[in-house]
Image (cartoon, helix red, strand yellow):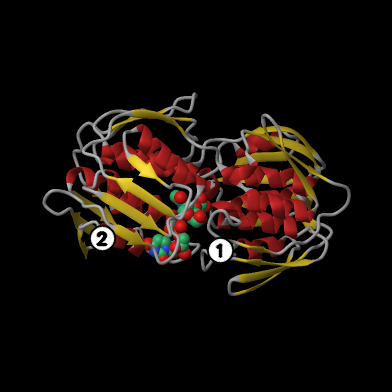
Amino acid sequence: MDQIIVHGNGPLRGEIPIAGAKNACLALMPATLLTDQPLTLTNAPRLSDIRTMTALLQSLGAEVAPLQEGQVLALSSHDLTSHRADYDIVRKMRASILVLGPMLARDGRAEVSLPGGCAIGARPVDLHLKALEAMGAELDLRDGYVHAKAPHGGLRGAVVDFPIVSVGATENALMAATLARGTTVLKNAAREPEIVDLAECLRRMGAQIEGEGTGTITIQGVDALHGATHPVVTDRIELGTYMLAPAICGGEVECLGGRIELLSAFCEKLDEAGISVEQTARGIKVGRRNGRVRAVDVTTEPFPGFPTDLQAQFMALMCVAEGSCVLEETIFENRFMHAPELTRMGARIEVHGGHATVTGVEKLRGAPVMATDLRASVSLILAGLAAEGRTTVSRVYHLDRGYEHVVRKLRGVGARIERIKEE
Ligand code: EPU
């Protein structure tokens, strides 16, 4: 297993290209199951989660051409040879549940393993199942699998009112509804840019959808969808992560392809902290004004609020800010696992349930630390950039799930970082 070594750094300067969004791509890929014609995704990221979704779709009979250097992912589900998403794959990645709605909508049957627990929270899938049940699906939970059947004549349109906002449940229901008979209304739907991207792709495939990006999405079912080519939206979490690098180290970095509207709540917090954020023709330019960063409170919320997927990285910045702040996590119940690791680097953090109080220190100190999940792992790298001496991050396979070429991208702006084989 590899390790990443980071040395405390001076100011960073240059450009970082931002990839297509992992979480958008993981929802777009299962859309191939809705049609027997080819679906081509451009601007797809090269990540281990994308390879896992590729393996899952291939196990169902889809053809997926390996990702080329040009970031093109060519998918085709002419015939599905299996309707079973096996535990062996699903346990590696929870987004596997997103094949359930499309398979059920297209062929009226699906067996999908339940994903089980996760490091950051319990993460049940009850809302996915309830939405499909509202569309007439019969579900039987046995042997760790959801055995699902559509009624005779296929799924039917329904009003689905989500009790809490769920990105994945909105995606599953949205895909299923494109082929259901009649109209589906999704209320309290997620509004994330990844939902908008999925709706745009489905519309290119012939779906009739209105209201994506608002809390109410209306879908008029059609008889069949066709092939399409769609560019994956920019990864706003990768974008926010790299925006934090010059915020922590000083200097000025332009994140190519970035747009402020993907991250407005996050950009406001950077501004409050004393970081300058400017939209340019090519992306977002981030620089640190003179002096230390100011501590600012943050509460994670569904889009357009501050994203939970940037909470760990923002905490790394707050560890070296002037003053104290409270970071409140409202989406996942166990998403402060990076706090004890940051504490090993000299950070002052106290966690009480869903709140973490961070009191900034002038300097962090390098230490051996362990990645516990994807976003936690990159927060340790950011902290390493702000630390004196050497930080060694192990278990970096978490990082490979969501960040392509992290070492290359950070070295490109002057960071001292390398990847080595673990002894
Ligand atoms: N929830 C339920 N029941 C459900 C579904 C969700 O109770 O059936 C709860 C969850 O446990 C959580 C909340 O609802 O407390 C929100 O979860 P959501 O369904 O929105 O999350 P998700 O679709 O499983 C996606 C991203 C996550 C991101 C969250 C929130 C993908 C593949 N994953 O997960 O990304 O944190 O939305 O924005 O899109 C990451 O990339 O590091 C990551 C964890």
Q: Specify the label residue 134 is tagged with.
A: 2
Q: Amino acid at mark 2?
A: Ala
CA gap, disc 1 and disc 2: 31 Å
In the image, residue 127 above or below residue 226: below
Farthest residue in the bottom direction? 352
- Mark 2 within 8 Å of ligand 1, using the beta carbon: no
Direction from residue 391 to residue 80 in the image, left or right: left
Q: Amino acid at mark 1?
A: Arg
Quarter of image, res 251:
top right
SS under mark 2:
helix
Q: Specify the label residue 335 is tagged with.
A: 1
Q: Earlier in the sequence, mark 1 or mark 2?
A: 2
Q: Position of residue 108 (x, y in %)?
A: 17, 48
Q: Specify the label residue 241 is tagged with.
A: none
Q: Position of residue 200 (x, y in %)?
A: 42, 38
SS under mark 1:
loop
In the image, residue 42 above or below residue 195: above
Q: Position of residue 199 (x, y in %)?
A: 40, 42
Nearest to the observer: residue 154 or residue 119: 154
Residue drawn at x 72%, y 45% as measured from the top left: 245
Farthest residue in the right direction? 290
Direction from residue 197 to residue 295 in the image, left or right: right
In the image, residue 146 above or below residue 76: below
Direction from residue 57 to residue 359 in the image, left or right: right
The answer to whether one can see residue 7 in this image is yes
Nearest to the observer: residue 116 or residue 2: 116
Q: Position of residue 371 (x, y in %)?
A: 58, 55
Residue drawn at x 50%, y 50% as measured from the top left: 192
